[in-house]
Amino acid sequence: MKTPNRDAHDPSHPETASVLLLSGFLGSGKTTLLKRILSWQTDLSNTVVLVNEFGDVGIDGALLEASGSGVVELTSGCICCTLSADLQQSLRDILDRFNPRRIFIESTGVADPTAIISALDDADLAGRMRLEKIVTVLDADYWEARENFGSLFYRQLETAHMILLNKIDLIAPEMIPRFLEEIHALLPGCQVVPTVRCAIDPETLWTPAAPRKAFLKPMHLFRAFTPDHEEDSSSSAASAAPFATFSFEDRRIMDETAFQGFLDALPWEVFRVKGPVRFSDRIRLINFVGGKGEWSDWTGEPVTRLAFIGWRVDGEAIQDRLARCIAAP
């Protein structure tokens, strides 16, 4: 395949490139997530994928080797480039050559994301790209052994807007609620989504991120979450990946205080709630992902219609609790 020719950066083009940074420790599943994103039936034109070693991605890798240029056009319509030692120079080259509207950066498993964030804050780059979201893939097994991995592992979590607790099919099912609770306790400002092979839908991934800041508590507090006892290693793994989907619909008015209390009390295993909610004076759309909710205006039908996704949750019990939020007539 020929190396694509793109117009140099057009200074008259006002659009800045949106950057998605994929972080995570070695073997956590970043490449799996990137491959999944590239397989979605979405428009990936004017998208650049920046990776440390393209061969690790496993997507048309032979084409890159054959081109000898470090740049290849994928069948999805996006461009993939290898990462040079100088990240800022790589980004400048990408902006000048391709003028992308979106950039995916897959960092190596031993990369410190704070260094990448610092590079993106460069004065020459800040006006031409914006960091949209940092997604850290966390191997569920690594969380249990977290004290062994040091400050780099800590920073990969600390900088994330969203954490995918991945490979939950390989651990005992009863461990997952505990891990989710522990992660939320340490990172109360982060979205946390349990996944198998990084299976996540585009809408969940692109949910707007809260402003990035360090939420993680001091590292010595990791010990506060060390298990007091050993779990039974013979417990059956969550190989069936029992994700539950269910919905709730009602035309009656919801009590706003009660509904907010309902959201606050949801178990961490319920990681996705979306839909309009009818209150007495307005209808609002809730978009709830991984423990964090965002409200927006809704001008559609006056009805509460919510879709839920969770892991090993009792849908009927949650629906019953939600029904108790209906305002008295």
Image (cartoon, helix red, strand yellow):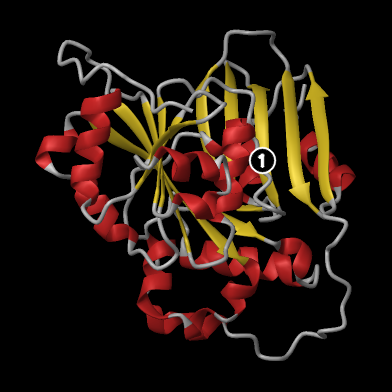
Image quarter in which the C terminus is found: top right
Q: Is residue 231 above or below residue 279?
A: below
Q: Is residue 123 left or right of residue 98?
A: left
Horizontal and vertical percent position of residue 298:
57, 14
Q: Nearer the viewer, residue 300 or 84?
A: 84
Residue 299 occupies quadrant? top right
Q: Is residue 154 above or below residue 87?
A: below
State the residue position of label 1. Answer: 272
- The residue sitting at 40% across, 84% down in the picture is 220
Horizontal and vertical percent position of residue 108:
42, 60
Amino acid carrying label 1: it is: Arg
Q: Nearer the viewer, residue 73 or 192?
A: 73
Residue 131 occupies quadrant? top left
Q: Secondary structure at mark 1?
A: strand
- The residue sitting at 39% across, 54% down in the picture is 52
Horizontal and vertical percent position of residue 72:
43, 34
Dot 1 alpha-carbon crowd within 10 angstroms: few under 14, some 14 to 19, many 20 or more: many
Whether residue 292 is visible to the viewer of this picture, yes or no, is: no
Q: Is residue 209 left or right of residue 13?
A: right
Q: Nearer the viewer, residue 210 or 76?
A: 76
Horizontal and vertical percent position of residue 63:
51, 38
Whether residue 109 is visible to the viewer of this picture, yes or no, is: yes
Q: Nearer the viewer, residue 16 or 258?
A: 16
Residue 37 occupies quadrant? top right
